[in-house]
Each structure stands twice: as structure tokens, then as C-alpha cells.
Amino acid sequence: GESVGLHLPTLSVQEGDNSIINCAYSNSASDYFIWYKQESGKGPQFIIDIRSNMDKRQGQRVTVLLNKTVKHLSLQIAATQPGDSAVYFCAENFVAAGNKLTFGGGTRVLVKP
Amino acid sequence: GAGVSQTPSNKVTEKGKYVELRCDPISGHTALYWYRQSLGQGPEFLIYFQGTGAADDSGLPNDRFFAVRPEGSVSTLKIQRTERGDSAVYLCASSFGHTGSPGANVLTFGAGSRLTVL
């Protein structure tokens, strides 16, 4: 399949360690912030989202933190596994604009065994 | 079907030719989105349908690009007089739509149609 991570920042992580992926967003009026995972040759896959009135949300092995003061979003993956190797994109959603997502630049995560 | 289906998965064409890319969204999803993704980039919004109508086509780069969704389900993205710069992966996504409804912000993407213009 086609690689989408050829020119992206790369985070190399040892299997079992925690990963932190960061993202700066642009629109302070965005209602939701979403993290997507994209494997080579596949479309983006929803991981977790967070509403703008929250600062933390936890899922299965993932936590998203939102800092609206500095317009910063992060995704923490606990106990990173080989299957977590992919490109991760943050996206913001301004509901009044019709739920169309604006994606940020991605980060490639490589998990070393 | 269980997911968003896109055909063809790969399309190679010559400069100046006409291309159609098809998207079959998740059954029951009223909103449908087209995005374009170039190598090493995040997806860029093209157009969004709510039902049969294009609610927002502000992302279409020029009038060579057009999309339809005549029955509120399957959508076709049409590109006329293709140029080499049109080469990219074209992604389709769908959601429950209805701004503000639970889950409306969760877009489910297809695997994409990779277009190569020679």
C-alpha cells in the first residue's frame, strides 16, 4: 500500500513504553478535537475525540489532553505495541461549519520490538 | 456494507482524461465527505454532502472537480481534464450528520482511491 509518512516527523518508541504525540491546532472556536490513526494503504481510523469544554479524556490505552490556553492537543498511548505503528493525525471540528474536519500535519510512530 | 467502500482502489490515467471515483458510504449515514491526501500530508477537505445536496463545496480546487450524490447514498467525484497535480489519494468519509447530534463528529473513512495522472 501507499505510505503516507515519507516526510513526516517520526517518533520511535520501544515496545512497552508510553508514546506522546503532540499537535498544535489553529481555530480557538473548534468544538471537537479528534485523533486519527492511519496505516499504510488505509484510510484514517478514528481513535478518540474530546470536546472543547474538556481538558482530558481517556479511552482504552489512550488519553487525549487539551490545553486551550496554548491551543495544544496531545495523544498518549500507554504500553505501545507493534500494532500502534502508523501515522497519527489530529483534526479539529467546527460544528457550525458542518462537521468537516481540518487535519493537522501527522506524526509517524515507529514501534521498535 | 460494514464500512465505507471506494472504487477503484487505484486509477492510472493520462493527462487530460476524465475520471470518476465512487464512494459507497455506511448505510444510514446521511453526511458524506470527500478529502484529498497528498503524500506526506494530512487529508484536505474537498466537499461535504448532507443528504443529496452539497452543503459545502469550498474545498474543491477549481471547476474541473465536481461531485454528486443523486439519491443521498452513493457519491461520485468527477475530475475533468486531469492534470499531473491531481495525483493523490482521494478519501471518502461518512457520518450520521445532523450537526450537534451524538456521534456526528465521528467520520468513518474508506481506504481511498489512489489516482495517478501520467
Image (tube, coloured by chain):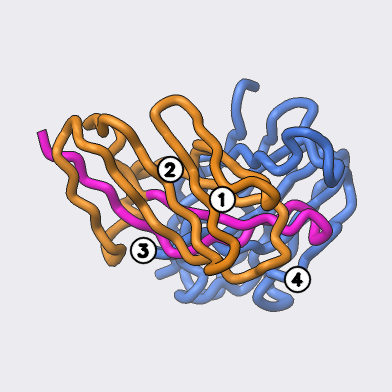
Q: Quadrant of the C terminus of chain B?
A: bottom left
Measured Cα–Cα span from mark 2 to mark 1? 14 Å
Q: Are marks 4 and 2 on the same chain?
A: no
Badge nearest the viewer, 1 or 3: 3
Residue at mark 1 to residue at mark 4: CA–CA distance: 16 Å
- The mark nearer the N terminus, 3 or 4, is 3
- Residue B13 in sight from this viewpoint: no
In depth, the one of B116 and A59 nearer the eye is: A59
Residue that badge 3 annotates: B40
CA–CA distance in space, label 3 to label 4: 23 Å
Q: Position of residue A20 (x, y in %)?
A: 33, 48
Chain letter of disc 3 in the image:
B
Rendering coords of residue A6 (x, y %) = 27, 61
Q: Provide the letter of the chain coloured orange.
A: A
- The percent position of residue A89, horizontal first and vertical second, equals 45, 53
Reading the image, the residue beneath label 1 is: B91
Q: Which chain is blue?
A: B
Q: Which residue is mark 2?
A: A37
Residues shaded magenta: A88-113
Along the viewing direction, whichever of A45 and A19 lies nearer the viewer: A19
Task: Count residues near mark 4 (Cα–Cα under 10 Å), then give few for <14, some for 14-19, many for 20+.
Answer: few
Residue A104 visible in the snapshot = yes
Q: Position of residue B78 (x, y in %)?
A: 68, 60
Circle 1 Cα neighbour tier, 10 Å, few/some/many (<14 / 14–19 / ≥20): many
Kind of residue sitting beneath label 2: Lys
Tell which tag, 2 or 1, sits nearer the viewer: 2
- Describe the element under mark 2 as helix, strand or loop: strand
